[in-house]
Image: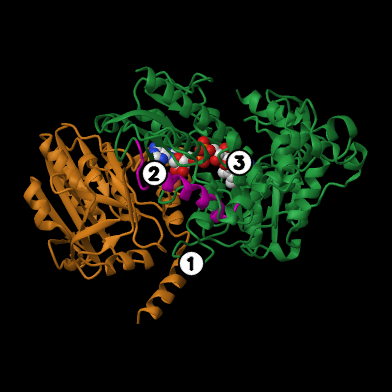
Amino acid sequence: MNKIIKKEFLSEQVFRMVVSAPRIALRRKPGHFVIVRPTAEGERIPLTISDADPKEGTITLIAQKVGVTTHKLASLNEGDYVQDIVGPLGNATNIRKVGTVLCAGGGVGVAPLYPIVDGMKKAGNRVITVLAARNKDLILYEKEMRAISDEVIVMTDDGSSGRKGLVTQGMEEVIQREHVDEAVVIGPAIMMKFAALTTAKYNIPTLASLNTIMVDGTGMCGACRWTVGGKTRFVCVDGPEFDAHQIDFDEILKRLGAYKEEERKAFEAYQQKNA
Amino acid sequence: MEENIYTIERSAPWRETLRKSMKASERTSIERVVMPAQAPDVRNRNNQEVNAGLSEEQAVREAARCLDCANPTCVTGCPVGVHIPSFVKCIEARDFQGAARVLKQTNTLPSVCGRVCPQEVQCESKCFYVQKMQKPAVAIGNLERFAADFERLSGKAELPEKAPANGIKVAVVGSGPSGLAAAGDMIKNGYDVTVFEALHEIGGVLKYGIPEFRLPNAVVDAEIETLRRLGVKFETDFLVGKTATLDDLREEGFKAFYISSGAGLPNFMGIPGENLIGVFSSNEYLTRVNLMGAASDERDTPILRGRTVMVVGGGNTAMDSVRTAKRMGAEKAMIVYRRSMDEMPARKEEIQHAMEEGIEFNCLLNPVECLADEKGHVKQVRVQKMELGEPDASGRRRPQPIAGSEYLIDVDLVIMSIGVSPNPLIPRSVEGLAISRKGTIEVDPETMQSSIPDIFAGGDIVRGGATVILAMGDGRRGAAGVMRYLSQK
Ligand SMILES: Cc1cc2nc3c(=O)[nH]c(=O)nc-3n(C[C@H](O)[C@H](O)[C@H](O)COP(=O)(O)OP(=O)(O)OC[C@H]3O[C@@H](n4cnc5c(N)ncnc54)[C@H](O)[C@@H]3O)c2cc1C
Ligand code: FES
């Protein structure tokens, strides 16, 4: 059981939670995630650790309300307890000085991106961050990212904030302007697919991190498997970051939708119960 | 010492009297008592335990079949040397509590083992009835289950004696049968025992893998409760190597470790289409249903229900998966196995139960490709017929594909049940730990000590996928190894 210390909404759908998890706070590094089970009846879902305070013994999680589980989590309040949190899981990002790093985040992808930007900057890199979303309200963490990046470019589909256009346009602008040594892209699978295609054109080594369906998070079930470089890998133990140019994004897009129908039904039942 | 207990008991006056109370010919003329079970077409639609357990009268009658041999060969078939005739004769004498006590001298988890051990290749295969008379063996497993259940349900389960606390902290990593057995022996000897478990529940495969209809959770929980009452501390949601390393735990004062992290990593075949939606590992499928309760509307975890389900493999895991799929509403649930019926490694009883429940068996058949519908969901499997060739390393005849024999089977779920590999997390996270080529932890088979003096290991992480009884036996040997190491330090 982990106590919720702080909870706030960053947008209508996206919320941030600071929870007590002293051991995880001590050991977590950028790139790590946790498996969360909000209630005793709940499902186990992976969430990235976007920040931690080892002194206070807390970790910060950011999630978007999509299905039953994230809605249940969002309905918990400060002082309540989350049933289970286990972690830190996965492999930490390989943070080192490479020169200039281009970081691109879409939607809630900025949550896992934040600690990587932070780490890359502290390692002495020049870090340029591109944040992208459909509109102004969905651009998250802009202030926080500005505080730790050398430059932040905001792209929105409707131009309500920053520039109008896709994440790839923001990225290309930087790549054409200056030498980029490495890129990190985190967001919806479709966004990562096109971001990876963009950096591939310029031969820029690129990391992508993806939130697959998971159950245990320890390599026991294979629910999180996907094809990377022609081989089946388990995201929870082999990832969550992989060479973006080796990932079969189309397969991921399909696998993420595996339970769409079951989830929709469950969510409708949940809404009715809580109406 | 153990020899002693046995001999004394056989020569005990009550037992001699009992032996003489019935002629051997009378004993051997009794038919093996059939285990009462739910009817196949009822049970394949519910999740309750298939076997109902013997009644007292049935148990006493079955126990009377045992000839109390002077040289009980059955004991040699038991991986942990349970004093079989002693407990069976206690049952015949209606001292059921005493029978449970005898069992617990060597087996920490008799109510589990009575249900899941492959008795037909262990103790029962060495029974005098089988060896010398070509008759069905004494139902040792059913009797073991009876005695252990009697004790559990009587509410009179005796809490084992416990040595005074010695304040020495020891850690057990993983809470499957191996870890539970090790924890039990160490707590009884006064050690301060903490069991670390990655999942949110205690029990390992007994909880997440083996279904309720074969091993009810209540049986496992009773064992865990006993350990709790003895003072064992359980830390769930704790993945050793990630949440804390062994070094961290050493710093926190743990003096030795028993690693029983199991062989959790599911193998896949590596065929095209294996990552399609609707293709699962049996671990995932069973975990969703057993641990996460996906069949219940009250639980949030989703599961795909298939009308036609193909399970690939012939072991216990495959039987559990296919029978679970049937219970989840599959109209057609089938096994596809690349060897023949004779080579199937599953317990005989499970195969028999599966057949009674309407499971279809397709032997000498191997999947070569999974094909998808337009949404990326599996809809067909291309299979290939096989024939048996020369025996391979395992002594079983090697299956070989028959050229040109491929055809398609329509499915909407595929469950891969083709074995597991050791969980690599601990081996990867501990520097200097000797690991075999298969990824198992290497240990001294007597002491279970690894290449690092304060680390001991046993169960599936040492053997690869094996059995509950072997894991349990390793746990006891490992506990003894840990305690000897600590007392000599
Ligand atoms: C579906 C199925 C059916 C089976 N049927 C039978 C049967 O009928 N008869 C039989 O004899 N055997 C059967 N087996 C095999 C038997 O269950 C195993 O051999 C036995 O459970 C192994 O015990 P163990 O204690 O070594 O490991 P496990 O039971 O696998 O337990 C290991 C535990 O360690 C935890 N863990 C792993 N890594 C870590 C870590 N780093 N930190 C903390 N915890 C960790 C895991 O979460 C798990 O709970 C079956 C197995 C399966 C999967
Ligand atoms: S989540 Fe189960 S193996 Fe990765």
Q: Chain of mark 1?
A: A
Give how far across and how far down residue B351 sits, in percent.
74, 47
What's the CA distance linking mark 2 and mark 1? 42 Å
Look at discs 3 and 2 and give the one toward the viewer.
3
| SS at mark 1 in the image | helix
Using the image, tell me which numbered label, if any, was put on residue A262. 1
Q: Is residue B204 visible?
A: yes
Residue identified by numbered label 2: B231
Chain A rendered in what hue? orange
The image shows residue B194 at horizontal and vertical percentages of 36, 39
Comparing labels 1 and 3, the label whose residue is closer to the camera: 3
| Residue B331 on the magenta span | no
Residue receiving disc 3 = B101
Q: Chain of mark 3?
A: B
> In this view, which residue lies farthest toward the front?
B13
Highlighted magenta segment, given as a residue range: B215-240
Colouring of the image: by chain
Query: Mark 3–mark 2 contact, CB under 8 Å?
Result: no
Q: Amino acid at mark 1?
A: Glu
Q: Is residue B270 left or right of residue A255?
A: right
Query: In green, which chain?
Result: B
- Per the image, label 3 sits on a secondary structure element best described as helix
Q: Give the amino acid type for the residue marked by disc 3 in the picture.
A: Arg
Chain holding disc 2: B
Does residue B330 appear to the left or right of B388 in the view shown?
A: left
Residue pictured at 53% horizontal, 57% vertical: B289
Mark 2: few/some/many CA within 10 Å (<14, 14-19, 20+): many
* Residue B11 as seen in the image, left or right of residue A63: right
Residue B234, above or below B481: below
The answer to which quarter of the image holds residue A119 is top left
